[in-house]
Structures are given as C-alpha cells and as structure tokens.
Amino acid sequence: MAKKLSDAETLIFLDRFHGHIGPYVVLGYRAGLVANRELGEDPFCKRARTFTGLEPPVSCFTDGVQFGSCCTLGKGNITVSGEGEPRVRFELKDGSKSVEISLTERTKARIAAAHGWETADRLGRQMLSEPEGSLFVVRFPPFTPTR
C-alpha cells in the first residue's frame, strides 16, 4: 500500500508533476483516489479512459487522474478521448467492475467562475480537502460481458 500523502505533500507533488495547481488537476487526482478505493490500488489491474481531450484547461484533469490512480500513458493503461469533459471511467482489466466519475454541476459552475491563475490556484487548493460527494458524481455502470 502506498504512503498516504498529506495535503501539503500532495500539492507539492502535483505542482512538480503538472507545473501548477488548479481545480482540474486536483479533481483528476481525487478521481484517481476514488478509483483506487473502489477498484484497488494496483495500477496494473485497471485501466482508465478520460473524456477531456487534449486542450487545457480541462485536459489538466487527465494529469491528475494519472497522478492519483497510477494509470499512466507510459504503462498504456489510460486513454484520452476528445469529448472535452472532465470525466473518467475506470474499469478492472477483466471488465468485472467499473466506476465512472464526473463533476457535479456546482463544481463545474465554481470552476467556470474562477478567472485567472491565482483564483484557479486557490480553488484547486480548496477542492483538495472538500467532501468528495460535493465535488463528484460517482456511478457504477453495470457489468456487460464482452463476447
């Protein structure tokens, strides 16, 4: 089991990895932690698909997902599709369980109202410790076996 980072340590590592702090990278990180709790921490047993596309700022969510879940482009167990949505679906590689995480409407509105680097930084730092239920909609899509 990985060492639990303090909020201060998490912010340092996220900033070093991503280059700055903002709401999308923090929320992606937290979504990765949800996946680890629900599907297990072993990144070799799960895969992720983010729906962010590759355009910042929403694509910053994908960096957070990589950092939080350890599903990475280098391991080949994360893909990015171009819907432009801060949403991610994780599943066990055997397909037996999945979890989809998206933002609440309130969370989206707060991000839309955050203008400028300082405001975005402050919001991201706040969101690191806010209750998960106020930030995310977490769904468990039904298992559909592939034939």
Image: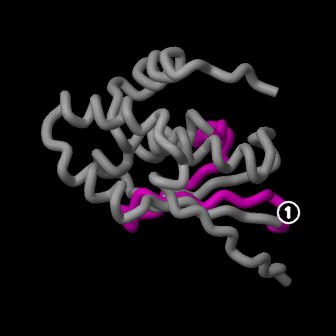
The quarter in which the C terminus is drawn is bottom right
SS for dot 1: loop
Residue 14 vs 9, above or below: the answer is below
Q: Is residue 63 visible?
A: no
Question: Is residue 87 on the magenta stretch?
Answer: yes
Colour scheme: one colour
Question: Is residue 95 on the magenta stretch?
Answer: yes
Which residue is depicted at the point 84% across and 67% down?
Answer: 96
Q: Where is residue 130 in the image (x, y as percent from the top left)?
A: 47, 40
Residue 96 vs 10, above or below: the answer is below
Which residue is depicted at the point 64% across and 48% down?
Answer: 34
Query: Which residue is disc 1 drawn over?
Result: 94
Magenta stretch, overall SS: loop
Amino acid found under the numbered disc labelled 1 = Asp
Residue stretch rendered in magenta on the structure: 69-96
Residue 47 vs 2, above or below: the answer is below
Q: Where is residue 44 in the image (x, y as percent from the top left)?
A: 79, 43
Q: Residues within 10 Å of mark 1 (few under 14, many from 20)?
A: few
